[in-house]
Amino acid sequence: ADAVGWLHLWNPWFPEGEYRLDLSIPEDRIMTEMLVVLSVEEPGENWLGETFNGYGFDLPVTWAKEGGVPNKGILTLTYHAEKSWVRPKVRKELCKRVAIRLISGADVEEEETST
């Protein structure tokens, strides 16, 4: 992701995976903001093994506020969501912030109305 950039490669429909984000890089900070949104909106323990500047870390409430993510530091984490935790509306909204776009929302809209 370093050469091309997270916002060109990241797919909010499948955010599960490992991350190493340098918050001094604007694109990494935006990625962090989106992962914070997912963590807040999707229930469960979805940030696993997270560290900030090499130390164990729990996502502080202040990061969920606008401008709350610091502009320096190294964040590492694994994002995990059980199927029942996924919030399609949230993930669809995040698609607007990245290069990958939703091709067809029919499946998502159908799933949202059936739950």
Image: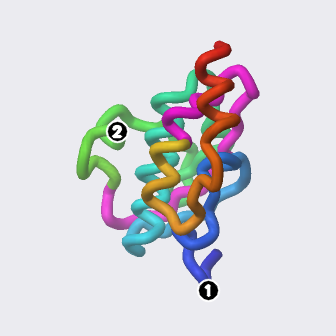
Please provide percent x and percent y for residue 96.
Answer: 45, 55
Residue highlighted by disc 2 = 64
State yes or no: discs 2 and 1 in contact (Cβ < 8 Å): no
Q: Residue at x 59, y 63 (%)?
A: 100
- Disc 2 or 1, which lies upstream in sequence? 1
Quadrant placement of the C terminus: top right
Please provide percent x and percent y for residue 105.
Answer: 61, 42
Q: Is residue 28 above or below residue 13?
A: below
Residue highlighted by disc 1 = 3
Secondary structure of residue under mark 1? loop
The amino acid sitting under disc 2 is Ala
Q: Is residue 70 above or below residue 78?
A: below
Q: Residue at x 50, y 36 (%)?
A: 90
Q: Residue at x 48, y 49 (%)?
A: 94
Secondary structure of residue under mark 2? helix
Residue closest to the far top: 115
The amino acid sitting under disc 1 is Ala
Mark 2 Cα-neighbour bin, 10 Å: few <14, some 14–19, many ≥20 = some
Region rendered in magenta: 70-91
The question of residue 60 being in magenta is answered with no
Closest to the observer, 69 or 90: 90
Query: Going by the image, does 113 lie left or right of 63?
Result: right
Q: CA distance from mark 2 to mark 1?
A: 28 Å
Q: Is residue 36 above or below residue 71?
A: above
Please provide percent x and percent y for residue 114.
Answer: 67, 15
Q: Quadrant of residue 110?
A: top right
Please provide percent x and percent y for residue 103.
Answer: 64, 55
The question of residue 85 being in magenta is answered with yes
- Tag count in the figure? 2
Q: Residue at x 64, y 48 (%)?
A: 104
State the mark number for residue 32.
none
Quadrant placement of the N terminus: bottom right
